[in-house]
Structure formats: structure tokens, C-alpha cells
Image: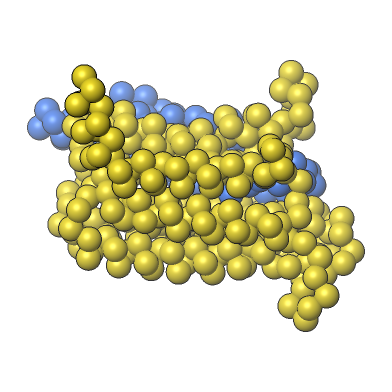
């Protein structure tokens, strides 16, 4: 597609803006605005939500970068030409760790915060996937149908395949937008804190597990399942644990 | 903490225009955001003005955004996005 968005000279230096990088930043900004609007509509402290969001986002980005190191073939051989990788599940994990720290330090209501930020997270992923489509990463398998996409630009990793590919990034993005709408609806309708987050865990894990069957980019595999599918199973298990958390806690207490 | 955030924000802005080194600016900017947000929370708790912390936060956010845009563009330029198969 169009991996390069713009190219210009600034102070006698050539500056290139990649479409993927630009859309990643746009996804952060739009999801941030969405969460702040939701916080205002829910009558939460917007200023406090703003600070919490920044901390969660920072933790998420750093964690996504650190987990990206595990996808590097040889960490010891990293040099100036090393290209860092952002890993979505690493970002999610980092965000959750920051939420737990906020709970311990400032006694915030953890499930209310998670319910609030999760539609922003899915919106960011939806826009990020459009970035993947333009950048030519996370591409799909070969298809002969009329909606197959060719990648001509040699910069795009998908250009290795000369055949038309399933636009799996756009399908993923579309499903994520639907999930975002459902989560926003749940946020305002659900009266029990944590319900929207649990709904995300189920919807996203099902979507991620299914979509992986149509992807054809290089990934790690474990027991025949891709890393994305392993991540989806963990999210689904976390959702089940949260659904039955009251029963689990009661069972543990009765044993003690 | 607020002053540190302001300084890191300015440093990240400088690094934004250094090509592949903008990754350093992004990390510095993120640390600036963390310090700025923590400073704002603590100052609000103590009932003190948050002006400098907010300034540091804004500078860090702008620096980080510019660094991210130019840094991810560098990845594309290097044609190394194949290694980023699991992005998002």
C-alpha cells in the first residue's frame, strides 16, 4: 500500500514520516480523547483520569518495547541498525501492571478504571491495524478472490509475496471498531464494575484467536498455536477467572 | 520531579530530529511523562500549584510524539519492518 506518508527537508536534513508511525501516534491521541470524553460523561475526575492514562500509556509503550526485545534474534548483537518492535500483548501487560501500582499507591477503583480505558485500547488497536495495512505488516494468507490485495512497494514486508493477500488487517480493524462500540454501550449500561473489562477479554480473545488462522506473517509458534493465539487463550482464561472471582475467593476463604 | 519532567521534555524534543537516535528521545520523553504525571498527582494531593509539572508533561508529550513519528518512520526506511511481524 503506502508505507511512506510524507518526505520533506528540514534544516538540510531529509525527514521521512512513515504511515504506520503516524497512525500509531494518531491512535494514541484519538483513544486518549475518547477515554477523556467517556470519563466526563461518567462524571469522573477528568484531570485525575488524564494523569492515570498517561502513566498507563507510558507503562504500556515501555513494556511493548521491552517485550519486543524477546522477538529479536540475538539481543547481544543489537547495534545502531537495530529496529525495535512494539508487541501488543507486552503493552497490555505493562498497562495492567501500572493499573495495579496505581491501585496500591492511590487506592483507585481498579475495575472502574479498567472499564473506562478499555474502549480506548480497542480503538487504538483498530487504528493501529490500519497502520499495519498501509505499512504492509501483519498481512494475511494468499487469496484468489477479488478483494485480495497486492503489495508492490518493496519496503512493505508483505511485498515478499507476489500473490494477492487477504486484507486481514482491515478485517481486524473493522471487528475492533465493532468491539469498541459494544464496550462503550456496556460501559454506560452495566452497573457492576468490571463487566465491560470482562466483556473485552472475551470478545477480543475470540477475535484474536480466529483472525490468526488467516495471517501469514512471520510469528512464533508454541504447540501448533501462534503467539497471538496463546495470548488469546490467556485473556479468555483471565475473563473466566474474573467471572467466577467471587466464587473462587469464597472457596479460598472457606478452606483458610 | 516537575523540573526533571520539564528538562526531559526539552531533551526529547531535541532528539526528535536526530534520525535513528530518536528512539532515545522517545524513551526520555516517556520518562518525562511519567515524572510529570506523578508530580501532578503529588502536587494535587498537597494542594500546591501544578503549573511546572503540567509544562513538563506537555513538553514531554510533544517530544515523545515527534520521536515516535520519526523513529517508526526510520524503521520503515531501513526496510526492517519484516522483523516487526507481531506489531499490534
**Residue B27 image position (x, y, % from top left):** 52, 31
**Residue A228 image position (x, y, % from top left):** 61, 46
Palette colour of chain A: yellow
Q: Nearer the viewer, residue A252 or B41?
A: A252
The quadrant the C terminus of chain A occupies is top left
Name which quarter of the figure residue A38 lies in. Answer: bottom left
Palette colour of chain B: blue
Q: Nearer the viewer, residue A68 or A19?
A: A68
**Residue A15 image position (x, y, % from top left):** 68, 50
Q: Residue at x 57, y 29 (%)?
A: A66
Q: Residue at x 23, y 23 (%)?
A: A255
A37 up-or-down from B46: above or below? below
- Horizontal side of residue A126 vs A163, given as left or right: left
The quadrant the N terminus of chain A occupies is bottom right
A5 up-or-down from B68: above or below? below
Name which quarter of the figure residue A31 lies in. Answer: bottom left
**Residue A83 image position (x, y, % from top left):** 71, 37
Amino acid at each position: 500500500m503506502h508505507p511512506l506518508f510524507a518526505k520533506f527537508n528540514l534544516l538540510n536534513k531529509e525527514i521521512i514520516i512513515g504511515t504506520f508511525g503516524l497512525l500509531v501516534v494518531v491512535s494514541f491521541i484519538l483513544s486518549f480523547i475518547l477515554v477523556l470524553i467517556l470519563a466526563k460523561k461518567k462524571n469522573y475526575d477528568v484531570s485525575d483520569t488524564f494523569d492515570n492514562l498517561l502513566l498507563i500509556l507510558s507503562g504500556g509503550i515501555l513494556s511493548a518495547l521491552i517485550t519486543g526485545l524477546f522477538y529479536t534474534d540475538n539481543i547481544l548483537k543489537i547495534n545502531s541498525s537495530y529496529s525495535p518492535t512494539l508487541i501488543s500483548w507486552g503493552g497490555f501487560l505493562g498497562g495492567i501492571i501500572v493499573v495495579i501500582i496505581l491501585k496500591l499507591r492511590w487506592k483507585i477503583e481498579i475495575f472502574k478504571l479498567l472499564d473506562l480505558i478499555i474502549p480506548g485500547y480497542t480503538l487504538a488497536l483498530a487504528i493501529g491495524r490500519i497502520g499495519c495495512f498501509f505499512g504492509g505488516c501483519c498481512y494475511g494468507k494468499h487469496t484468489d478472490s477479488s478483494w485480495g490485495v497486492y503489495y508492490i512497494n518493496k519496503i512493505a514486508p508483505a511485498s515478499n509475496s507476489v500473490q494477492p493477500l487477504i486484507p486481514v488487517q482491515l478485517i481486524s480493524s473493522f471487528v475492533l471498531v465493532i468491539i469498541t462500540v459494544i464496550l462503550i454501550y456496556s460501559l454506560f449500561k452495566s452497573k457492576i464494575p468490571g463487566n465491560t473489562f470482562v466483556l473485552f477479554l472475551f470478545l477480543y480473545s475470540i477475535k484474536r484467536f480466529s483472525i490468526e488462522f488467516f495471517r501469514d506473517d512471520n510469528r512464533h509458534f508454541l504447540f501448533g498455536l501462534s503467539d497471538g493465539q496463546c495470548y488469546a487463550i490467556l485473556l479468555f482464561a483471565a475473563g473466566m477467572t474474573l467471572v467466577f472471582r467471587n466464587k473462587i475467593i469464597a472457596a479460598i476463604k472457606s478452606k483458610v | 520531579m516537575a523540573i526533571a519532567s520539564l528538562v526531559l521534555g526539552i531533551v526529547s524534543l531535541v532528539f526528535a530530529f536526530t534520525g535513528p537516535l530518536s528512539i532515545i528521545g522517545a524513551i526520555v520523553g516517556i520518562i518525562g511523562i511519567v515524572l510529570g504525571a506523578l508530580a501532578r498527582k503529588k502536587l494535587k494531593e498537597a494542594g500546591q500549584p501544578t503549573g511546572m509539572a503540567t509544562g513538563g508533561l506537555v513538553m514531554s508529550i510533544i517530544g515523545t510524539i515527534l520521536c515516535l513519528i520519526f523513529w517508526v518512520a526510520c524503521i520503515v526506511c531501513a526496510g526492517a519492518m519484516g522483523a516487526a511481524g507481531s506489531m499490534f
